[in-house]
Amino acid sequence: MIEIRSLSAKLGGAPVLHDIDATIAPGRVTALVGPNGAGKSTLLAVIGQLLKASAGSVTLDGADLSDMPPPERARRLAILRQNTTITPRLTVADLVGFGRYPHSGGRLDDADLRIVDACLAELDLSALAGRHLDTISGGQRQRALIAMTLAQTPRALLLDEPLNNLDLGHVRRVMEVARTRARAGVAVVVVLHDLSIAARFADALIALKAGHIFAAGPPNEVVTGPTLSALYDTPIEVHEVAGSRVVLT
């Protein structure tokens, strides 16, 4: 379980997050939503200890993440950022194998390789395992980065806009993989802009606006016309289609 208490953060000296309190439970997919500049990626970076909070705390299973030694933290928490620089001459399998580094120290054994193979298969990458990253598409590279993050086998999985560059079939696959990991007991946090996808696949949403929590709860409470219209300062309609909520602007 991730517990966020009285959390505030700054970027370049400017306040970005203000007194955030939230609990992110294992077994669930939690989506962070909200307009541009609301603080979604900043909150994910603070949870992942890529950015230091100016106040408050983040704990994972009761342990303060800021006090946790980096090697232990890397075994328990994995984060995919929006912009990740990778060496183009790596193969897809090599990249995914890097996800095992916190466990293997770079010396992958048979158990590590089985995990790599499983993550490749989950993201529909097995046929591309031997391809170099500069020979595949942007969407395929994005899936390889997600597979690398999954290979860490963390207790907490943080994904910042993982659906960038993905076609519709792989959007569904990635969200189903996230949900499968959650059901296995992982606390999954995903930054999403597609509210229809969030409503369909997330168990809970945290809506941020101007660095504050604007709304939080299950999709049927957050994904409503009045709430989203106020969140984004524009008229938004929400309709039920085949049992799922569809958001129209």
Image: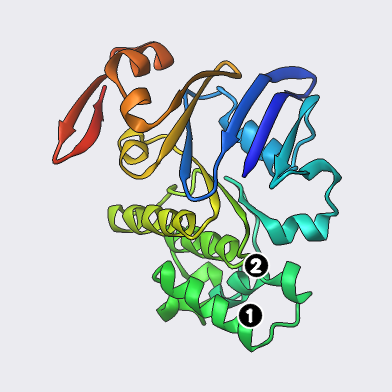
Q: Which residue is mark 1?
A: 112
Which residue shows up at 55% across the image and 22% down it? 38
Which residue shows up at 69% across the image and 47% down it? 61
Q: Earlier in the sequence, mark 2 or mark 1?
A: 2
Which residue shows up at 59% across the image and 70% down it? 96
Left or right for 93, reference 47: left
- Give percent across and percent down for residue 245: 24, 33
The foreground one among 134 and 181 is 181
Q: Amino acid at mark 1?
A: Asp
Does 107 sit above or below residue 185? below
**Do we see residue 89 in this rendering?**
no
The part of the image, by quadrant, that contains residue 72 is bottom right
Q: Secondary structure at mark 2?
A: loop
Name the colouring of the figure: rainbow
- Give percent across and percent down for residue 36: 51, 24
Which residue shows up at 55% across the image and 60% down it? 145
**Do we see residue 234 in this rendering?**
yes
Q: Which residue is mark 2?
A: 99
- Give percent across and percent down for residue 232: 41, 16
Report crowding for label 2: few under 14, some 14 to 19, many 20 or more residues within 10 A (C-alpha): many
The foreground one among 181 and 39 is 181
Q: Secondary structure at mark 1?
A: helix
- Give percent across and percent down for residue 86: 64, 61
Residue with the most extreme front position: 62
The foreground one among 26 and 76 is 26
Q: Nearer the viewer, mark 2 or mark 1?
A: 1
The part of the image, by quadrant, that contains residue 173 is bottom left
Does 145 sit above or below residue 89? above
Report crowding for label 1: few under 14, some 14 to 19, many 20 or more residues within 10 A (C-alpha): some
